[in-house]
């Protein structure tokens, strides 16, 4: 199913249930593998496994920060 987005009509954000990041990894010749994140481009990595490990750690940190923020907000 092809979905077209315009300024007038946008599909609701699917969030954690669906995420397509086909262009998250890219290779720069003679430099290495880079990762496109919300915070910008990170790299170079020598192997994709190393970049995937980095992303896993980044996601874990993000979840921990979300939990800590939620706990602080619930204390108010």
Image (tube, rainbow, N blue to C red):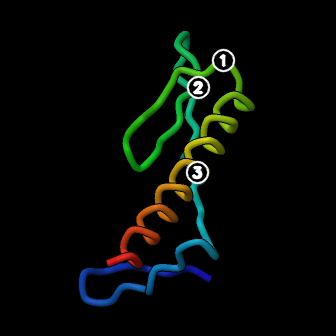
Establish if 66 lies above or below 15. Answer: above
Q: How far is mark 3 from mark 2, CA to CA?
A: 19 Å
SS at badge 1: loop
53 with respect to 30 (left or right) = right
Q: How far is mark 1 from mark 3, CA to CA?
A: 20 Å
Residue behind mark 1: 46
Nearer to the camera, 36 or 29: 36
Residue 33 is marked as 2
Establish if 50 lies above or below 67. Answer: above
Nearer to the camera, 74 or 32: 74
Q: Residue furthest bottom?
A: 9
Residue behind mark 3: 59
SS at badge 3: helix
The quarter of the image holding the C terminus is bottom left
- Considering only order in the chain, which callout, 3 or 1, is on the residue closer to the N terminus? 1
49 with respect to 68 (left or right) = right
Establish if 65 lies above or below 18. Answer: above
Quadrant in the picture for residue 18: bottom right
**At 52% across and 13% down in the image, what residue appears?**
31
Q: Do tag 1 and tag 2 residues touch (Cβ < 8 Å)?
A: yes
Establish if 54 lies above or below 14. Answer: above
**At 64% across and 32% down in the image, what residue appears?**
51
Quadrant in the picture for residue 54: top right
């Amino acid at each position: 199913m092809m979905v077209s987005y315009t300024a007038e009509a946008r599909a609701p954000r699917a969030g954690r249930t669906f995420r397509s990041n086909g262009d998250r990894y890219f290779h720069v010749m003679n430099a290495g593998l880079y990762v496109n994140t919300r915070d910008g481009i990170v790299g170079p990595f020598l192997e994709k496994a190393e970049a995937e490990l980095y992303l896993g750690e980044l996601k874990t940190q993000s979840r921990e920060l979300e939990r800590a923020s939620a706990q602080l907000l619930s204390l108010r």
